[in-house]
Amino acid sequence: MEIAFVGGSESVLGFNLAGVKKSYAANTEDELVSKIGDVMADSNVGILVLKQSDYNKLPKRLQEQLSESIKPTMITIGTEQSTEMREKIKRAIGVDLWK
């Protein structure tokens, strides 16, 4: 299983330097949706990483699809407040680690 990142060009460079080989630049919303579709169709990708700000730009239907996806599992990063990771961990292990 591989990790993939989709986001802005600057972030792609950072993920490439960190060893993530499947890092795709998407500077517009259309490119973002297209690249995410490509990653979701790639059976070798187990984890999809997105910036929270990019995730928030996606159409609601795609957000729901990503949130419910098991393969790849989507993880958002960034400074914006998100309870998604907390909920995924709670569902996976049955315990809220933040309490």
Image: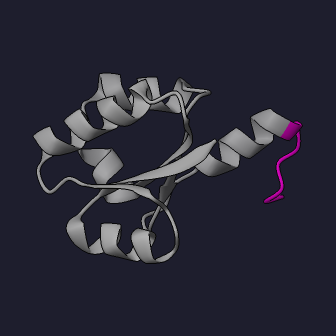
**Between 63 and 23, which is closer to the camera in this rendering?**
23
Give the residue at x 54% y 51%.
3
The colour scheme of the drawn protein is one colour
- Dividing the picture into quarters, in which one does residue 70 lie? top right
Residue 14 locus on image (x, y percent) = 39, 76
**Between 54 and 5, which is closer to the camera in this rendering?**
5
Is residue 39 located in the magenta-colored stretch of the structure?
A: no
Can you say whether 56 is above or below 77 in the image?
above
Give the residue at x 79% y 59%.
98
Please count the marks in the image.
Answer: 0
- Dividing the picture into quarters, in which one does residue 58 lie? top left
- Quadrant in the picture for the C terminus: bottom right
Give the residue at x 20% y 53%.
26
Can you say whether 38 is above or below 22 in the image?
above
Q: Main secondary structure of the magenta part?
A: loop
Residue 18 locus on image (x, y percent) = 51, 74
Residue 94 locus on image (x, y percent) = 88, 36
**Between 41 and 75, which is closer to the camera in this rendering?**
41
Can you say whether 9 is above or below 48 in the image?
below
Residue 1 locus on image (x, y percent) = 64, 41
Give the residue at x 39% y 36%.
39
Q: Is residue 91 left or right of residue 46?
A: right
Find the magenta span and give its range: 93-99
Can you say whether 83 is above or below 9 in the image?
above
